[in-house]
Image (spheres, rainbow, N blue to C red):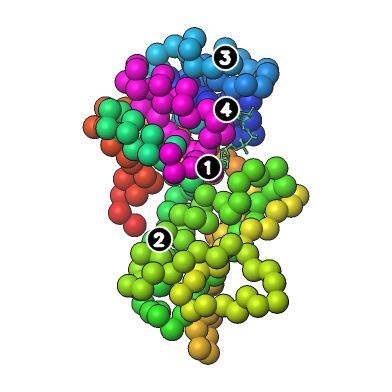
Amino acid sequence: MKILISGAAGHMGREVAAQAGSAGIKVAGGVDVADVQADFPVWADFTQAPAVDCIVDFSRPASLDGLLAYAVQNRIPAVLATTGYDEAQLAAIDEAAKVIPIFRSANMSVGIALLRALSRKAAQVLGDDFDVEIVEAHHNRKADAPSGTALMLYDAVKDAYNAPREAVYGRHGRECHRDHNEIGLHALRGGTVTGEHEVCFFGPSERITLRHSAENRSVFAQGALRAAAFLPGKAPGLYTMDDVVGEI
Ligand SMILES: NC(=O)c1ccc[n+]([C@@H]2O[C@H](COP(=O)([O-])OP(=O)(O)OC[C@H]3O[C@@H](n4cnc5c(N)ncnc54)[C@H](O)[C@@H]3O)[C@@H](O)[C@H]2O)c1
């Protein structure tokens, strides 16, 4: 199968290109606003991009409009790994998924799919007495905070409670006592950290921490290529890692 890499000049785009061959996938081209030396053609936008079996996108939310227009017009499935979309962009993805299959996940690692399932289970079992805090750490180039993965973990945990638990992003100030019905999200940034996520459950006299560390970015590239191999031929709709690896 042939793919097009959106964000081909970026750290993840180059990792996807490096891993594609060993997954039996050919890179037919790339799209990026930046220049890159590659052994496939790279265009500045999607207007000249050829027909491929799937698009793999690790870029910026700004690329979404052009990507979806190209994908929908040519009926090409898309793996969207970019994070930081706003509400309108998420709605546009939902609309496009009525026409083409779209895989979207803020984290392409199978380990994070498991962490998500374990976190939801922990929230259900531990119940209302436990306070939940989510802590993530990433390299100093990361644009969005908190990470898309932290937000995904927040969604998984929040849905386990009957009473709404609101997100609180960091804490600062003289009067910021913790409300029971909140889930804290905290973002650390620095150096070259690939991606660390912790979901902490603080109970009356015990504490449970679930933790995932990505040791290098190849795990995300491999997950994205696995998703790209999965999508062609699927019905229009939104797919996640749970669909690819089966129910966890
Ligand atoms: N889902 C996952 O598992 C996962 C894992 C790692 C990174 N990410 C996300 O993937 C994205 C890329 O990460 P990265 O570390 O490779 O970043 P990066 O900054 O190294 O690369 C982003 C690339 O996108 C390009 N770009 C920017 N705007 C563009 C546009 N409008 N059209 C086309 N290309 C454009 C940039 O020129 C750059 O080459 C980020 O959103 C990051 O959070 C997701």
Question: Mark 4 sits on what residue?
Answer: 7
For label 2, count other residues whose C-alpha is less than 10 Å away and answer few (under 14), some (14-19) or many (20+). Answer: some
Secondary structure of the residue carrying numbered label 2: helix
Whole-number angstrom distance, CA of label 1 to CA of label 4: 12 Å
User: From mark 3 to mark 2, how far is it between C-alphas?
Assistant: 37 Å
Write down the quadrant of residue 70 in the picture: top left
Ligand 1: does it lie within 8 Å of the C-beta at label 1?
Answer: yes
**As displayed, is residue 27 above or below residue 227?**
above
What amino acid is at disc 2? Ala
Instruction: Tell me the kind of residue under disc 1.
Output: Thr
* Occupied quadrant, residue 45: top right
For this view, does 175 lie left or right of residue 225? right
Q: Residues within 10 Å of mark 4 (few under 14, many from 20)?
A: many
Tell me which numbered mark, 1 or 2, is placed earlier along the sequence.
1
- The residue to which callout 3 is attached is 43
Decide if residue 64 is in sight here. yes
* Residue found at x 57% / y 14%: 43
Magenta-drawn segment: 59-88
Q: Where residue 48 sits: x, y (%)?
A: 49, 9
Q: Residue at x 64, y 34 (%)?
A: 11
Q: Looking at the picture, which amino acid does disc 4 mark?
A: Gly
